Amino acid sequence: MLVFDNMQGVDTEAITQQTNPSLQEAWHLGCTGRSLEALTLAGEILVDAKARGDDRLAAQCDTDIAWYCFQIGKAELGLTHVRRAVDFWKLSGERKQESYARAYFGWLLLELGLPEEAIQEATRALDLADKAADPKAQSLATNVIGIIFWYNKQPDRAILMSERSVELARSIGNRTYECWWLINLGGAHSEGGYIARALGQSEEGRQMLVRALELTEQALDIATETGDSWAARICLGNKAEFHSHLGEHDEALQCMVRYRLFQESNYVRDRQQYLYTLGQIYNNCGKFTEALSPLLEAVELIDAGGSFDSCIQIYLYLSQTYEGLGQFDPALAAHKKYHQAYLRNSAEKTQQRARLAEIYYETRRFKEVAETESKRAETLEASYQKLQEQTDILASAVYLDVLTGLYNRKYLDSRFKELASEKRPYSIAMLDVDHFKSINDNFSHMIGDRVLSAIGTILRSQLRITDQAIRFGGEEFVVLLAGAPRGAADVCEKLRSAIEQWDWSEICNGLHVTISIGVASTLSAKSPNEILAIADQNLYAAKKTGRNRVVS
């Protein structure tokens, strides 16, 4: 990442970029609203770095590309790059660089509605940043943890962490980070305002929304100063939303007019946010006819990209528009789609909120100590380190497999108890890596571990958001597939093909990996254990008939 003129201290990441002016230029593009151009340029540098065998430069490209993918709403593509970067930085022992990559990793996972995995990566990133004693990396990782609190409806903790990230950015003079983190700090205040209003605390809610506007205006000033049109668009969209919730509809629409002035590129993510924010504002002031057109256009863009959260917002506002127009059948249909999208990640959010409740206690202690001790700076660092130790313990919680980042056997057992009482249809797939013993024998157990880790990445990127992947043990995996059984075999065939076509030479030349899959569903048996047993039988049949196939 680029170190700006007012940055202080030595930054080896900046040194990497300064030795490659094109990479430096790509980061500048990404910091001035031209992220698609940045992605293209960094991709070209990556190809050249790989051809020359410059693994470190390639890893830096992968790290930066992950951020550009986040900016333009291509989270799944970003995951492919950032996981590769994490592997390199970890093997090379470069803690600071690994911290940046893991922070982006966590942010992308959250973007896809995976908070459980997101908190794991974000807390790892913060632990690495602390060990490297690098305030810039600490600022990034702390910000991501703040966003996770925000997304999980805990604004007090989100504000605490976001304030810390802004302080760190200011301490090193990084105006770009200061701008970005101020946006998130404003968002956390707005969340607190919405919650307060829902609880009947109207004045407290109004004050928090006013504070959100002040913070966002500060961020907008910096974005304008630095020429960051991407950040400026976010600021104006957020300001429009806050004004609208305060009943200041004319001011909100003025923000959306200014928003268009910063639209230098037509990213799907950017266009979606503009459209559904405009629809929301029209809804709030009762102009439902004007709201319908932008929201319908936003619906058409859902399949082209955008975040899980955007999908939820679009259908929610569309249902409100149809209701306002008196068109109750389409209003009900839109609300059903909103409800379905909202429920996709309910199981993961339940687990995450339980763990965040544990983090809350340590966070509160951290805040109390920071505010009452006379030697604030020293006490802040000591209590902050304690918080990181606790969150690191939580991040390696009982339900996660460290090697693959997937859920583990213990989590599967807990899900089976829940599934036993549910009446909704589902399927279970058993996956086994073909000839895995030969991979260990011919390439080494370290390569075998990297294969399993890569399979974890592929499963996360290929599965639907409603599905869950579990490392069952050794080279065996289980996938819980929600919904009607008729589509389960197709999902599994997609997984099989993705693993067969994966570029395994990136791990080791001559390496080729395939999997066999057995599938069974609630059509075959009633209990989860019975379904799993049938899936295992089908897996055996798949291996017996030649491997690298799906049997259902």
Image (tube, rainbow, N blue to C red):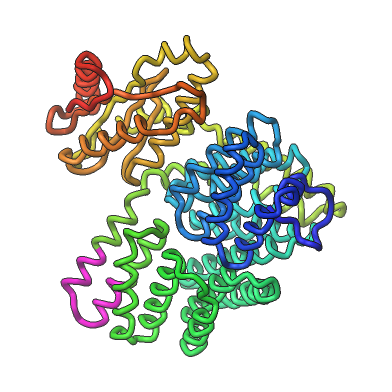
Q: Front-most of 134 and 56? A: 56
Where residue 429 sits, quadrant-wise, is top left
What secondary structure is the magenta-colored segment mainly? helix
Q: Where is residue 405 shown, x and y percent of the image?
A: 48, 33
Furthest toward the right, the residue is 375
Q: Could you tell whether 465 is left or right of 8 in the image? A: left
Give the residues drawn in magenta, as a range: 318-335
Q: Residue furthest left?
A: 523
Residue 315 at least partly seen: no
Q: Residue furthest top?
A: 441
Asked if the stretch drawn in magenta spans residue 45, the answer is no
- x, y percentage for residue 90? 63, 32
Q: Position of residue 253 (x, y in %)?
A: 47, 86
Where is 468 relative to 76, above or below? above
The residue positioned 36% from the left and 41% from the top of the image is: 462
In the displayed structure image, the side of residue 100 where residue 451 appears, left or right: left
11 left or right of 504 in image: right
The total number of labels drawn is 0
What residue is rendered at 59% in x and 63% in y? Answer: 184
At 51% from the left edge and 27% from the top edge, which residue is drawn?
507
Where is residue 127 drawn, in percent x and y?
67, 39
Whether residue 3 is visible, yes or no, is yes
Quarter of the figure with the C terminus: top left
Q: Is residue 11 above or below residue 488?
A: below
Q: Is residue 327 magenta?
A: yes
Depth order, front residue of 125/25:
25
Which is more toward the observer, 196 or 69? 69
